[in-house]
Amino acid sequence: MSSTGITAPAGFTAAGITAGIKPSGNPDMALVVNNGPEFHAAAVFTRNRVVASPVKLSREAVSDGQIRAVVFNAGNANACNGTQGDLDAAEMQQRTAELLGLESGDVGVCSTGLIGELMPMDKIRAGLEQLVPALGDNGTLAAQAIMTTDLVKKETVVQAEGWSLGGMAKGVGMISPSLATLLSCFTTDAVATPEMLDTALRAASKQTFDTLDVDGSTSTNDTVFLLASGASGISPSQEELNAAVLEASLDLTRQLQADAEGVTKRVVVTVEGTSTDEQALDAARTLARDNLFKCAMFGSDPNWGRVLAAVGMADADMDPEHISVYFNEQPVCIDTTGAPGAREVDLSGADIDVRVHLGVDGPGRATVRTTDLSHDYVHINSAYSS
Amino acid sequence: MSSTGITAPAGFTAAGITAGIKPSGNPDMALVVNNGPEFHAAAVFTRNRVVASPVKLSREAVSDGQIRAVVFNAGNANACNGTQGDLDAAEMQQRTAELLGLESGDVGVCSTGLIGELMPMDKIRAGLEQLVPALGDNGTLAAQAIMTTDLVKKETVVQAEGWSLGGMAKGVGMISPSLATLLSCFTTDAVATPEMLDTALRAASKQTFDTLDVDGSTSTNDTVFLLASGASGISPSQEELNAAVLEASLDLTRQLQADAEGVTKRVVVTVEGTSTDEQALDAARTLARDNLFKCAMFGSDPNWGRVLAAVGMADADMDPEHISVYFNEQPVCIDTTGAPGAREVDLSGADIDVRVHLGVDGPGRATVRTTDLSHDYVHINSAYSS
């Protein structure tokens, strides 16, 4: 019960091992097992229409609201591998089930890494044999094993009244609105129906993972699982469950943002003064994805003109003559005109807060988290087939 | 008649001078005058809702189908400067008209440079005094004076039967679908009504400037003028006019792409195998804007998985299991699965052709021109307030 991450809640064991999939020799396979007494689960997946083979399998597996184990590998996404990819994912699922004495449909599968390379199934098979005997209080090992270009592992634990929620995540690039996570798994010992879990997970994702936009690119493999063992015997209300999942999701989202590829600035963009939250979100995402704005943030440059140029293209109600912009709560543009001292605002710190008011008297408001566009982002992503 | 660019067609004079707006001391003001006998004109403008003061004025000036002169400055966009910006643009227009003996409504105004700095009107006023006496066969000087971070001037001439069309353009960053040019001006000595000019310009822009996407950012100042003097006495058909404007626009678009900020690769993205041209265009733009794809191009990396991940997010009909990708006409992905030798495709050259078939039996097809995302792009755009 004093352990970290996904094995903090009662009823869960995990393992992380090195199967040799990553050329680096770092750990690259993980397993999470729900030992019950309940096996309720929910999951959300990428909105990309090109999806990896494990996503197809996991969608099907969770459709009955029950998952007993999730197997992960890093270093290969098993995406765009055709029929062989589907067969390989199915073998991972089936062999994991056999080793655990479960049915195939009880097992979720998550893969992350390079798209379009066949899975090294010899290594996967040997890795599965290692994983099952290694199961234990190993949340941290599992969190390490799902890393790709992540520099640090991401874990969280939320303690509630008599129950807890643990989580892990990986993801540093190809991070964009429709589920920003790549891979994440939550565990809880609360007693909760699959419907409650689904409600809590969708609500939290919308406010956290979905608001992180590192590079506008959406992965083929994004998956977030929420598994509930019921081992605490405590039945939280929907609101209590929502609050815990939101807190844990927000914590992991901040960790993902802080470790984004090439990040030197953590930028929080808030848009208000438009008709609806959806419009505000569109404008915030348009700004968060604008490369000129992101380069200015890298340069600590309070070039608010680029903010105006970006939001002017958004699908949001606005008054083009009455837009205001604040950097770290200092006004730099009022009524679409530069404010005194705007060019002298100090953006040298690692955290930059950007608030834009679109000039319309409406309740729309949204926040998106993004990063700067740095030399390191280009370096990392122009290296051969990362 | 043997001169270059916008003074190649009969009936036009131009000037380019140094007014001291650019810190570099390079030429920064230009003037194009149509000496008639006709003064027909058309123009297209940025689709950004935040527009610069000169765009508002020029839109109004061209609304009667007549423009006799266009004055340009580089180094300051006169955007987001509030009422003072509107007054300054109006003074530029009015003073130019006075010096040329015209009405204000005969003069178009184009500005490019930093957003949100008030125009240095002392320098502008003195520059206008210099410009008018400098008018002559100076198309090239004008093309040089409108450059910002452009490394080379962009000019074109199309010779038709007894008439000609000249053009100039500037633009290297903040280049995105809804008019990719920043500033461009065409001149022709053909006899053509404003309606014919408008038809030809809109059709050509859609196929050329609108298909260039360097960074997904859309300027507040984009303007393309087409001025017709009728001095050749030749009346081309609409088709002949369309063909000449298209040829000149395509030439300038290629020059803009080749000089894009930080460019090391010229990438042409073609999407087919979807229901409509609009859907194909959406998919092509989604790919052309994807930073991970653009970084892979910079690294000469045939990482086709990023192509799949990008187009999978497009608003286009597709068969996610039957997408094919070709790099320089070599198949790298067939039916959403890697083709033999895909990782060995040589992308080391400066021109990369990417063709994507979305797997649907439909007539949709579109081409977008883009560039790679390089260290130099980040460097140029993270320098203080470029």
Image (cartoon, coloured by chain):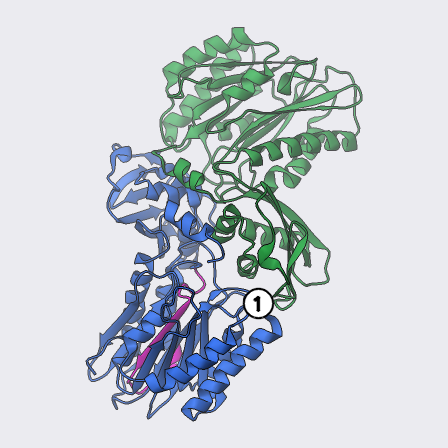
Chain colours: A green, B blue
Look at 35% across and 69% down and name the residue there. Answer: B169
The magenta stretch spans residue B274 = no
Residue B363 location in percent, x, y? 36, 56
Look at 43% across and 42% down and name the residue there. Answer: A375
Look at 52% across and 78% down and name the residue there. Answer: B89
The magenta stretch spans residue B188 = yes
**Hey, which quadrant is residue A78 in on the image?**
top left
Dot 1 falls on a residue whose secondary structure is loop
Label 1 resides on the chain identified as B
Q: Which residue occupies the extreme top position in the image?
A: A133
Residue A367 location in percent, x, y? 65, 47
Above/below status of A144 relative to B370: above
Residue nearest the observer in this picture, B223 or A379: A379
**Hey, which quadrant is residue B96 in on the image?**
bottom left
Residue A331 location in percent, x, y? 66, 57
Q: Is residue A177 visible?
A: no
Where's the N terminus of chain B, which quadrant?
A: bottom left
Disc 1 marks which residue?
Answer: B80
Q: Is B201 displayed left or right of A131 in the figure?
A: left
Q: Amino acid at mark 1?
A: Cys
Above/below status of B30 relative to B94: above
Above/below status of B300 relative to B104: above
Residue A159 location in percent, x, y? 74, 22
Specify few, some or many for label 1: CA neighbours under 10 Å numbering under 14, 14-19, or 20 or more: many
Q: Is residue A143 visible?
A: yes
Magenta residue span: B177-198
